Amino acid sequence: MLFIIGDSTVKNGSAQQWGWGSFLADHFDSTQIKIENHAIGGRSSRTFITEGRWERILAVLKPGDYVLIQFGHNDGGALDDTSRARGSIKGIGDESKEIYNPIRKQQEVVYTYGAYLRKYVTDAKAKGAIPIICSPVPRDNWKEGKVNRANNDYGKWAKEVAVATGTFFIDLNNNIADKYDAMGAEKVKPLFIGDHTHTSKEGAKLNATTVAESLKQIII
């Protein structure tokens, strides 16, 4: 069994926007491995845990299962704003901050992006499962003919956590950005819909192919 956890770039509830997790199973033999996409739009590495979603997966996680993890797009927000309250502290350190969460209406200790990733890894390994960290897929943002990469923040931090914990890592940010650069901005534009973050069906399929290319080296 392979469980996917993440945000709207992995599973989208819109009729026109799609996440790559919806097409990953197309690349694998369903008699050999079953894939469940538990990603949900709007969630960060923090809120996927605080809403109890991770606990529900842990309850059924078995030795030998895989957990594919991609967060970061929603982690940059405020820690305690009244509309989302989903941000995590930047970086991979051990810092924490106690806040009043206006959404959950209770006190909450918020940790770093890296700390939440480490929790997924530690919890999965404790169950005998195999975690795989992905850097966030790139947005449709360009500078001087090249797509912007997250090599100074969430992409970098995801890799650092993977290295520090001895966890498999798929560098989606750079692997997909390489493809975008080769295509050029005009050809990449139709791969997004509505904004610079959410992919169309074709964009999600390209991302799913990129995930599968690396994943097959890990699970086969």
Image (tube, rainbow, N blue to C red):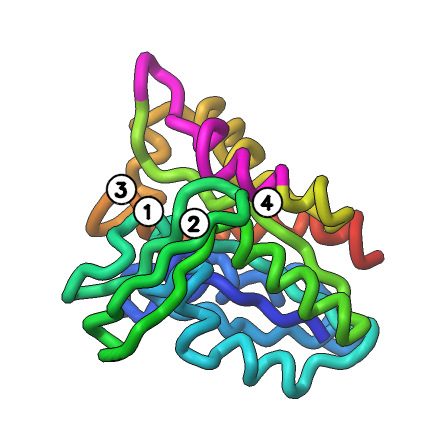
Q: Which residue in the protein does label 1 denote?
A: 76
Residue depicted at x 35% and y 31%: 187
Q: Nearer the viewer, mark 1 or mark 3?
A: 1
Disc 1/disc 4 C-alpha distance (Å): 25 Å
Q: Nearer the viewer, mark 3 or mark 4?
A: 3
**Amino acid type shown at disc 1:** Gly
Vertical order, 3 against 145 (above or below): below
Q: Which residue in the protein does label 3 denote?
A: 196
> Dots 1 and 4: beta carbons under 8 Å?
no
Residue 150 visible, this orientation: yes
Which percent across, then down, holds residue 118?
62, 56
> Dots 1 and 3: beta carbons under 8 Å?
no
- Asked which secondary structure carries label 3, the reply is loop
Disc 1/disc 3 C-alpha distance (Å): 16 Å
Q: Residue 100 lies in what quarter of the image?
A: bottom left
Which percent across, then down, holds residue 182?
48, 23
